Amino acid sequence: MNATGRLQRFKAAIQKTGVNFFVEVPARVSSSMRSFAHSGRIRVAGQLNQTPMQGTLVPVSGGRHRLFVNGGTRSAAKVGLGDVVSIELRPTKPNEVVAPEDLTAGLYRVPGALDAFNAQPVSRRRELIRYVDDARTRQSRERRIAKTADHILGKEAPRAERLAAIRERPLWTCPRCGNQFVNKNGFHSCRRWSLDEAFKGRPAFVRELFQHVRALIETCGPVRMVPYRDRVGFMVRVRFAGATPKRDCLEIGFWLPHRIASERFHKVETIYPNAHIHVLRIRQPEELDSEVVGWIKEAYAVGCQQHLLQSG
């Protein structure tokens, strides 16, 4: 690694708050890295039980920090709640990016890939590293490294002359149920569900929240609403958003071509370098503010496959 700060080692037990797993960072480690803090947070790179990881030390009371550990890292390291893990970390500067050694080595083996990676903006490099770190097995991590190389070299992106044809190609209609999909014979269930079934057993205020979300989505343009047994999807050419009723909230998710760092999200799942599912939990209509509206509009553009223009 070429990180600027000194390597710090410690052991800690994996704990959990809400849906998030974390380890408590010793006071001595927080103190040693304080000069790297930006708004109290410290970016770090290192290993957990010899599994590469990137992260941010989040400040808590008493000048100490927590390090949150994502599902990919936990799975790859084969650890869970209560396990004591060995951690090695170096602090990095706010605009410094330290790529894991296996990612650097994998990109180096593909002509031009490492240079293309290093030429990406800081935020984009971090996004790609997070995509690799979210892998849950070593084999999956290797596949993601290969996909990252293809992605930054544009190998999987459609050629410009094919792009318009892809976006304007008629949708395939299932002859059994009438549902439409971008790809012929797309996997799906032909059963038809209703909104009443999707919201069965859920409080009335959750259904009301859904109507607010539905109205916001429909202001973006033409959209198809597809109810399922326990959720509702929204599609244009592809599905770009969905709503899942819970007992105490409405969970809404949307597909964005880049990952957004916001504490408002319940979780963010990276499924491809340019596909990130962002999930919010809404409990009051007032939470559907201008920021959420902006995210929904961006997701709607993905539903129209406009994101292909960015990758082509």
Image (cartoon, rainbow, N blue to C red):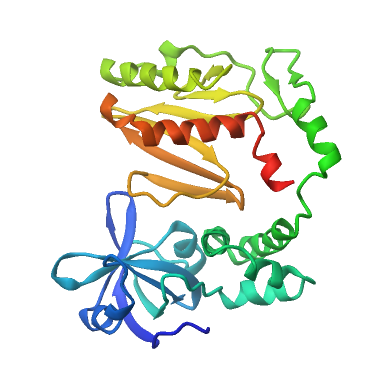
Snapshot quadrant of residue 246:
top left
Q: Nearer the viewer, residue 259 or 130?
A: 259
Image: 280 above or below 208: below
Image: 69 above or below 297: below
- Is 207 positioned to the left or the right of 76 in the image? left
Residue 209 coordinates in the image, percent (x, y) = 33, 21
Snapshot quadrant of residue 247:
top left
Q: Residue at x 21, y 72 (%)?
A: 64
Residue 92 coordinates in the image, percent (x, y) = 42, 76
User: Would you say residue 47 is visible in this rendering?
Assistant: yes
Image: 33 above or below 42: below
- Is 57 positioned to the left or the right of 110 in the image? left
Residue 292 coordinates in the image, percent (x, y) = 39, 34
User: Would you say residue 14 is visible in this rendering?
Assistant: no
Residue situated furthest bottom in the rendering: 6
Q: Residue at x 29, y 75 (%)?
A: 12
Q: Nearer the viewer, residue 44 or 228?
A: 44
Snapshot quadrant of residue 185:
top right
Q: Residue at x 66, y 64 (%)?
A: 145
